[in-house]
Image: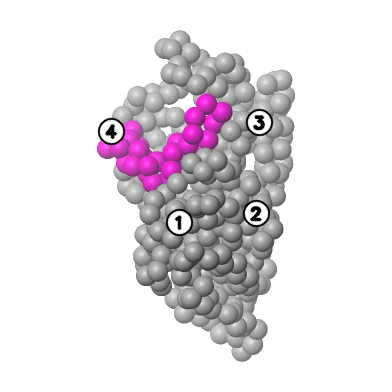
């Protein structure tokens, strides 16, 4: 039987045919099963209220045994992943392919910009469309993947990550999909001018001198000039790139634009740009945990550099513990955040993957912290804290899945 179902009554295992309300704002690439709570949470965050369900195709998904979520007690446990666990890990693998492909496209953009060649917008539009569709299907998967960082690839990865972040944020704010496409392209291109900055300044480990900082700031104008020469570039894509370093107090660059002339979209990309810069590992510094980055964003908003309301919305969008963040549990294990619990944001769904003392990889079933009192998050951590890297973690989880 085909029925219209309120999103609050939708459950994992249901087969969704279409989005019925709001009509016309969103569309499914294809009918599919809702294979994780993360997908359903993603639909809710986008503002989707009703969907069309084929009840004859509903699958029964086994619930996680609470006993399997209990903390270790001196024994080694290894549980087979549930069906929904496997699906999430498969989506992460697919998201990683999109992320890696995006970096290859970014590399070509930097090469063309450095050599004064026009940028080819076709591959950029194609890959951002692919990212948008993936985010719509499961925003948690790509949000998880952008935490995979190589310290020597910050220049390539940063713009890709900002494009993903502004896409996730825009969907959360219920911005129309066509507008999201333009924002994603702008995020992808926003830092292309950094290829003009000498490496000794771009990668300097210490504080820049005043003269060096002036050279560094020039990347923003280089980006604008390059994007303006790009055939068929949309005005909105150019706008977000032009405004990404401007501040509400008028002390930003390259043009010292005041708050009245900084659009909502310019304010959004500033938040995404700073958040990614704060949380990224680079060859000369370790990134901050996401929770600390949120505190810095709030401090910048208090200083009238960022939009305070949008900062709070961004934090709600990302979650207190963002998807892809690493946390230490009180069972002396590390886990990766797989999805949010909207009703209880300090208790997300997590997947343990690493045991401390002795340190070794050991995957376990995912745990909904909102439904158990046996596990608590002790703190948010980074992979570097334990001499791990996110690429290694994701590859391990994908293999186990």
Q: Are marks 2 and 3 in contact (CB under 8 Å)?
A: no
| Residue 160 point in image, percent of width and height | 60, 40
Marking on residue 396 = 2
Contact, CB < 8 Å: mark 4 with mark 2?
Answer: no
Q: Which residue is mark 3?
A: 230
Image depth: mark 2 or mark 3 in front: 2
Q: CA distance from mark 3 to mark 4?
A: 35 Å
Gap in Å between the C-alphas at discs 1 and 4?
38 Å
Q: Is residue 206 visible?
A: yes
Query: How many other residues sit within 10 Å of disc 1, few (<14), some (14-19) or many (≥20)?
Result: some
Q: CA distance from mark 2 to mark 3?
A: 40 Å
Q: Residues within 10 Å of mark 4 (few under 14, many from 20)?
A: some
Q: Is residue 300 above or below residue 94?
A: above
Q: Is residue 101 left or right of residue 227?
A: right
Q: Secondary structure at mark 4?
A: loop
Marks 2 and 1: in contact by CB < 8 Å? no
């Amino acid at each position: 039987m085909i029925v219209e179902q309120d999103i609050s009554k939708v459950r994992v295992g249901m087969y969704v045919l279409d989005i019925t309300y709001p009509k016309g704002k969103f569309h499914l690439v294809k009918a599919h099963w809702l294979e994780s709570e993360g997908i359903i949470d993603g639909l809710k965050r986008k503002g989707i209220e009703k969907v069309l369900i084929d009840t004859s195709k509903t699958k029964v998904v086994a619930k996680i045994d609470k006993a399997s979520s209990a903390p270790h007690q001196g024994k080694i446990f290894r549980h087979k992943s549930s069906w929904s666990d496997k699906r999430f890990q498969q989506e992460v693998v697919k998201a990683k392919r999109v992320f890696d492909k995006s970096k290859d496209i970014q590399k070509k953009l930097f090469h063309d910009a450095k050599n004064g060649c026009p940028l080819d917008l076709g591959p950029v539009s194609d890959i951002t469309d692919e990212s948008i569709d993936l985010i719509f299907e499961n925003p948690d998967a790509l949000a998880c993947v952008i935490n995979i960082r190589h310290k020597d690839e910050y220049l390539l990865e940063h713009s890709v990550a900002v494009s993903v972040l502004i896409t996730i944020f825009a969907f959360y704010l219920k911005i129309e999909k066509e507008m999201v496409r333009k924002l994603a392209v702008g995020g992808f291109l926003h830092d292309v001018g950094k290829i003009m900055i000498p490496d000794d300044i771009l990668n300097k480990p210490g504080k820049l001198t005043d003269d060096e900082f002036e050279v560094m700031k020039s990347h923003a104008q280089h980006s604008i000039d390059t994007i303006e020469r790009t055939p068929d570039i949309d005005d909105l894509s150019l706008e977000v790139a032009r405004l990404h370093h401007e501040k509400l107090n008028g002390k930003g660059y390259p043009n010292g634009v005041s708050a009245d002339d900084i659009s909502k979209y310019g304010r959004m990309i500033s938040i995404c740009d700073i958040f990614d810069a704060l949380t990224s590992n680079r060859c000369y510094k370790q990134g901050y945990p996401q929770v600390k980055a949120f505190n810095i964003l709030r401090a910048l908003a208090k200083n009238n550099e960022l939009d305070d309301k949008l900062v709070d919305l961004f934090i709600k969008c990302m979650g207190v513990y963002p998807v892809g963040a690493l946390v230490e549990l009180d069972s002396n294990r590390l886990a990766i955040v797989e999805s949010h619990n909207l009703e209880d944001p300090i208790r997300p769904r997590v997947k343990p993957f690493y045991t401390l003392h002795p340190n070794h990889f050991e995957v376990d079933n995912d745990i909904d912290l909102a439904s158990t009192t046996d596990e608590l998050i002790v703190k948010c951590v980074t992979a570097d804290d334990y001499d791990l890297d996110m690429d290694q973690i994701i590859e391990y989880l994908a293999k186990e899945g």
